[in-house]
C-alpha cells in the first residue's frame, strides 16, 4: 500500500550554525525582517546573538517579544497587525514551540485574509506564505520542522491545531548551544513532550514504515540522553542529541499524527494554562497503559527499542513501556495533576472536552469514552 511522507525544511545543524543567518536573509533578498521571541529567550541572551547576526544582513528589523505560552488567537492577531503595518517580508522565529507556532500563524495571515481561527483543521491555508527561518531553543516540540500550529481559542476555551504543508518553516537553524540555558524543569518537560511525540506517532493508526523508523530512532535517543541533559544542562553531547532527536521525531509525527495524550494535554492547557510538555508528561504513562490492549505488539517493539527486559509473554510485556515511562516521569520530577492545581471536580468537564479533540481520530484505541478519560485523569492525579 502506498504511503506519503512529507519533509520540507532545509536544516542547518550544529554549533555556531546561527552564523548562517545573514546568508539566508540575503538569499531571500530580505528588506524588512520580523524577529519573534519571548522573555525567556531575551533573558538567556539568545535574542542578542541572533540580532547581532541579522545586523550583518543590512535589513530593517522589527521585534515582537510578546510571545506567551500556549499562544492565543489574540496574540497572533496583534503580532500580525504589526507585521502587516511594517510590510515584513521574512520572519525569524527564535524559541520553543510557542514562539515558532505563533510566527507560523502570523505568517498565514500575511498572505491569507480573515482571522486565524478560520484556518483550524487540515489544509485550510489557501495561499503560499512568506519565508520563515526557525531557530529552536528547546528540544521538545519539533515545531521548527512540522506542518502544525497549536493555538489557544480563549473564547471557546480550547486548543486547536492548524495542519498544512504550506506553513512549514523554510529554513531551520538548530544550534544545540541555544538549549544550554533551559532551566531543568523546562528541559525535563520539553524532553517528555518529545518522548510523547515519538511514542504516540509510533502507535498512531496513520503510522507507516517511514514514520515508524523515525519514531523508534527518536525514542532511543531521548531515552538515553534526556536524563543526562536534565542532570547536567551543560552536557553538550546530551543537548546535541536531544535536538537531533527532536528533528527526527518531528519527521515522524508530522506525517503520522498524535493521539489521546495530546487530546488530554490540549484540554489541560486550554483550561489551566499548563505548559504543553508538562501536560503531556503527566498523563503519558497512563494513556500508554490504556492503549496497550489495542497495539500490544507495537508496545513490545517500543520496549525492545529501549532495551527493556522482554519476557516473551505478550500480556505482561505490553505494559513494560507504560511502567518505564511512569518511572521516568518520577525521576525527572514531572508533577501530578493535583500538584499542578487541578481538582477531581474538574475531571467531568475536562473529559467532555477531551472527547471533542480531533487527534483522538489517530489514537490506536478508538471509541474513547468519558469514563475512560476520567479513569486516566484519576491515575495521573
Image (cartoon, rainbow, N blue to C red):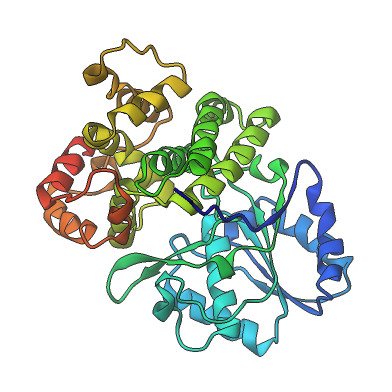
Q: Vertically, is 173 above or below 77?
A: above
Q: Residue at x 84, y 53 (%)?
A: 19
Q: Vertically, is 261 above or below 86?
A: above
Residue 349: name its quadrant: bottom left
Q: Residue at x 24, y 36 (%)?
A: 294
Residue 279 image point, x, y percent:
35, 47
Residue 1 image point, x, y percent:
44, 48
Q: Residue at x 81, y 60 (%)?
A: 21
In this view of the protein, which residue sits in the foreground, 252 or 68?
Answer: 252
Number of numbered discs on residues:
0
Residue 354 image point, x, y percent:
23, 57
In this view of the protein, which residue sits in the foreground, 172 or 127?
Answer: 127
Q: Vertically, is 318 above or below 209?
A: above
Q: Residue at x 35, y 58 (%)?
A: 273
Residue 258 image point, x, y percent:
38, 49
Instruction: State left or right for residue 279 relative to residue 101.
Output: left
Q: Vertically, is 84 above or below 170?
A: below
In the rendered view of the protein, which quadrant contains the C terminus? top left
Amino acid at each position: 500500500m502506498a504511503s506519503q511522507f512529507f519533509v520540507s525544511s532545509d536544516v542547518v545543524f550544529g554549533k555556531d550554525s546561527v552564523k548562517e543567518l545573514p546568508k539566508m536573509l540575503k538569499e531571500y533578498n530580505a528588506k524588512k525582517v520580523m524577529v519573534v521571541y519571548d522573555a525567556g529567550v531575551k533573558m538567556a541572551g539568545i535574542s542578542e546573538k541572533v540580532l547581532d547576526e541579522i545586523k550583518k544582513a543590512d535589513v530593517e528589523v522589527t521585534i515582537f517579544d510578546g510571545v506567551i505560552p500556549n499562544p492565543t488567537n489574540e496574540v497572533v492577531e496583534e503580532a500580525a497587525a504589526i507585521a502587516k503595518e511594517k510590510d515584513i517580508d521574512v520572519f525569524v522565529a527564535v524559541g520553543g514551540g510557542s514562539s515558532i507556532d505563533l510566527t507560523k500563524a502570523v505568517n498565514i495571515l500575511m498572505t491569507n485574509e480573515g482571522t486565524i481561527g478560520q484556518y483550524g483543521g487540515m489544509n485550510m491555508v489557501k495561499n503560499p506564505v512568506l519565508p520563515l527561518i526557525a531557530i529552536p531553543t528547546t528540544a521538545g516540540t519539533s515545531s521548527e520542522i512540522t506542518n502544525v500550529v497549536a493555538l489557544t481559542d480563549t473564547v471557546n476555551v480550547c486548543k486547536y491545531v492548524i495542519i498544512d504543508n504550506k506553513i512549514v518553516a523554510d529554513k531551520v537553524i538548530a544550534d544545540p548551544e541555544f538549549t544550554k540555558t533551559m532551566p531543568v524543569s523546562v528541559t525535563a518537560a520539553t524532553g517528555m513532550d518529545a518522548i510523547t511525540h515519538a511514542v504516540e506517532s509510533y502507535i498512531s493508526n496513520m503510522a507507516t514504515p517511514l514514520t515508524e523508523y523515525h519514531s523508534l530512532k527518536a525514542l532511543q535517543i531521548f531515552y538515553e540522553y534526556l536524563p543526562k541533559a536534565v542532570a547536567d544542562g551543560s552536557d553538550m553531547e546530551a543537548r546535541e542529541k536531544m535536538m537531533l532527536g527532536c528533528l527526527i521525531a518531528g519527521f515522524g509525527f508530522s506525517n503520522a499524527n498524535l493521539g489521546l495524550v495530546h487530546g488530554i494535554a490540549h484540554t489541560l492547557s486550554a483550561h489551566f494554562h499548563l505548559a504543553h510538555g508538562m501536560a503531556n508528561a503527566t498523563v503519558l504513562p497512563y494513556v500508554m497503559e490504556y492503549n496497550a490492549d489495542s497495539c500490544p505488539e507495537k508496545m513490545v517493539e517500543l520496549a525492545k527499542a529501549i532495551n527493556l527486559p522482554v519476557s516473551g509473554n505478550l500480556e505482561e510485556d505490553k505494559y513494560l513501556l507504560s511502567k518505564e515511562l511512569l518511572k521516568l516521569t518520577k525521576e525527572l520530577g514531572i508533577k501530578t495533576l493535583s500538584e499542578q492545581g487541578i481538582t477531581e471536580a474538574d475531571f467531568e468537564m475536562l473529559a467532555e472536552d477531551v472527547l471533542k479533540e480531533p487527534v483522538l481520530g489517530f489514537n490506536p484505541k478508538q471509541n474513547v469514552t468519558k469514563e475512560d478519560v476520567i479513569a486516566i485523569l484519576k491515575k495521573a492525579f
